[in-house]
Amino acid sequence: MRPDTLELLRGTPMEKLTMNISGMTCGHCVGQVTKALKSLDGVQVEQVKVGLATVAYDPSRTSPDQLAQAVEDAGYVVRPVQLGRAPKSGSER
């Protein structure tokens, strides 16, 4: 686990974002979107599959627009479908 991921899980309230992503057709696309999202500071990738990505992010370190831009810079089209507070992890529940 990346050091910043541990920091994210401990303190700052995370927001959750699920995006519809057009143009993804295969496992390579999944890998490219995952790589693009993981490159952003304050992001924990929860799931990426063809056509959909869900992340938890620290709103003080990144934004939905930055998340969408990273995916679009990788060559895909993004439409957010759900925003919300990510559930607390582990002992914080």
Image (tube, rainbow, N blue to C red):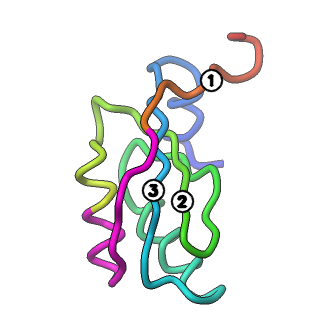
Q: Amino acid at mark 1?
A: Pro
- Residue 53 position within the rendered picture, expressed as x and y whole percent measured from the top left: 54, 59
Residue at 35% x, 80% y: name it: 74
Q: Which residue is mark 1?
A: 87
Q: Earlier in the sequence, mark 2 or mark 3?
A: 3
Going by the image, does 52 lie left or right of 59?
Answer: right
- Residue 28 position within the rendered picture, expressed as x and y whole percent measured from the top left: 59, 89
Residue numbers of the magenta segment: 69-82
- Residue 83 position within the rendered picture, expressed as x and y whole percent measured from the top left: 42, 36
- Quarter holding residue 47: bottom right
Mark identifier at residue 19:
3
- Residue 80 position within the rendered picture, expressed as x and y whole percent measured from the top left: 37, 52
Q: Magenta span has 92?
A: no
Q: Which residue is mark 2?
A: 53
Q: Earlier in the sequence, mark 1 or mark 3?
A: 3
Residue at 55% x, 42% y: name it: 3
Alpha carbon distance from label 1 to label 3? 18 Å
The one nearer the camera, 88 or 85, is: 85
Residue at 76% x, 12% y: name it: 91
Q: What SS does tag 3 mark?
A: strand
Q: Amino acid at mark 2?
A: Ala
Q: Earlier in the sequence, mark 1 or mark 2?
A: 2
Q: Magenta span has 73?
A: yes
